[in-house]
Image (cartoon, helix red, strand yellow):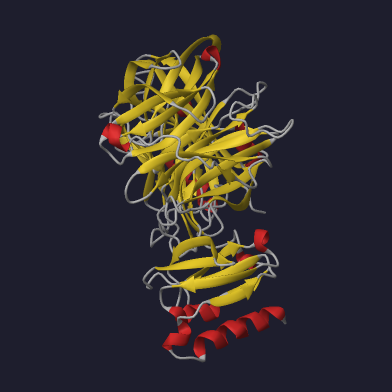
Amino acid sequence: MKLAFTRIVLAVLIISGSRSLLAQPLSLTITKRYLNLPVSQTQTRGTMQFLINNKQERSFKIRLAADKPDYWVFCDMAALQGKTITINYDGKLEGLSKIYQDDKIAGQDSLYTETNRPQYHFSTRRGWINDPNGLIFYEGEYHLFYQHNPYEREWENMSWGHAVSKDMIHWEELPTALSPDSMGTMFSGSTVIDYDNTAGFNKGSIPAMIAFFTVDNPEKQVQCMAYSLDKGRTWTKYDRNPLIDSKAKWSSKDTRDPRVFWYKPGNHWVMVLNERDGHSIYTSRNLKEWTYASHVTGFWECPDLFELPIDGDKSKTKWVMYGASTTYMIGSFDGKTFTPESGKHYYTTGTIYAAQTFANMPERDPRRIQIGWGRVPQPGMPFNHMMLLPTELRLHTTKNGLRLSSVPVKETEQLVEPILHGASLSADDANQKLKSFNQLDQFRIKTTVKLSHATSAGLSLFGQRILDYDLNANLVNKVFYSPENMTSMELTADIYVDRTSIEVFIDGGAYSYSMERKPVSGNKEGLLFWGNRIDVKDFTLYRVKSIWK
């Protein structure tokens, strides 16, 4: 009854009056968890404001649907229960009559079962996502923050979305962590746990989780911080932000994406910050005052810098400097200066961008685990893009020197169930076995193929070539790849197929790539090995469980 009353009141306020009446703000007492808002991609964006006692609580841009909505988004109002808000909107006002409160989001009953919803990759309930931010492990939880537009399936209103997991596979989405403010919108960054209270935000025995992020506005990009004392659930922005304003130094607005970590040998904090043409390094004792130390050119956006053992030997290590496009350098680091020794290299290509590794991993589990943004659209859905599988990074000695490799974390094994196996088969025989499994919604297939001619061969899915190995030109799906055994006729591929994405790991992760899964058209072939008289040395097909059920 209260829900119906709320809708009626809003409708009367909007429909009953003249244009001048329509321009009047709406007042609403919050009694439910969510405020559901209709969106139409054909509408021009307007600015919506929530005011409490004439003070702005939030402001965002939205394409509020004036007629039939394309989809619904929501505002989480848990922190505002019992409060009266005033809603101002400077766009087309007809859509205000459709806004309603509920303890469910609009579409809750079909959540995670939508046609194009990734079934074992993280995607947000509603809106747009891009760069992963602030990846950190703390007290049994893996935190995934990410660039987020809660109010539309396209880029805008950059905020920090937030999800937590016990295993990096099954995720629980939490309320937005950081929202735009009077300084600007919340761009990418990182988090740390300040165990030694260097910044002074700790409360008793509770260490602060501190987020470092870029604030973007039309004039410049500056570096700021916020802290949380409840495991990232609520945040307080530092009242003396910004920490770094380096536009004048670099004559560039492009100063963003702070990656902060503790450098134990020097007993200080390090920030790696992308500035203009590469990555700068800053140092600090208290996380508030930062000193510029050095700069490495040749990178763009979303830096990462971490130490890895060589071939698993903890007594021998090298540092890896990383950029958003997945290129990296290998070298040494003394706490202030990174000295490149080889690179730039790549180990993965495709839809991945702006990947980041987890901070604060426990001593019992020192893996370097990375999650990347999967630039994979979900057509017709009220959400857009996704995160790729978490992968473990390792540093190996190869014929070309030290190189990174990546494989899906061991936690993914809980999702897979083998349903078909074959060995020492011709392509025709393997294809005959696969025929009965062409309707799988999501699956994994691991295979080793042997070529008998220096020509292309591989695996297709309803006509889309998900594995295409050109032995003559050393190309895997048109990207140069030279196997460790340069004269090998074999290639091993571990392929993960979700509803809208495909991830492929070649030869134990020596090279990997990701791609959008194309919609099935008229092709009826399903999974198909192809090539000139190739041998399928073995393959295993796995069913993959949904992480949402």
**Residue drawn at the location 37% of the way across and 72% of the way down:** 42
Q: Nearer the viewer, residue 461 or 328?
A: 328
Quarter containing the N terminus: bottom right
Q: Is residue 97 toward the left or the right of residue 404 in the image?
A: right
Quarter containing the C terminus: bottom right
Q: Nearer the viewer, residue 314 or 17?
A: 17
In the image, is residue 287 above or below residue 61? Answer: above
User: In the rendered picture of this protein, how many numbered marks are placed on residues?
Assistant: 0
Expressed as whole percent of the image width and height from the top left, the position of residue 543 reads 60, 46
**Residue drawn at the location 65% of the way across and 47% of the way down:** 233
Expressed as whole percent of the image width and height from the top left, the position of residue 407 reads 51, 30
Determine which quarter of the picture holds residue 352. Answer: top left
In the image, is residue 380 above or below residue 340? Answer: below
**Residue drawn at the location 67% of the way across and 21% of the way down:** 364
Q: Nearer the viewer, residue 356 or 440?
A: 356
Expressed as whole percent of the image width and height from the top left, the position of residue 28 reads 62, 74
**Residue drawn at the location 50% of the way across and 42% of the way down:** 496
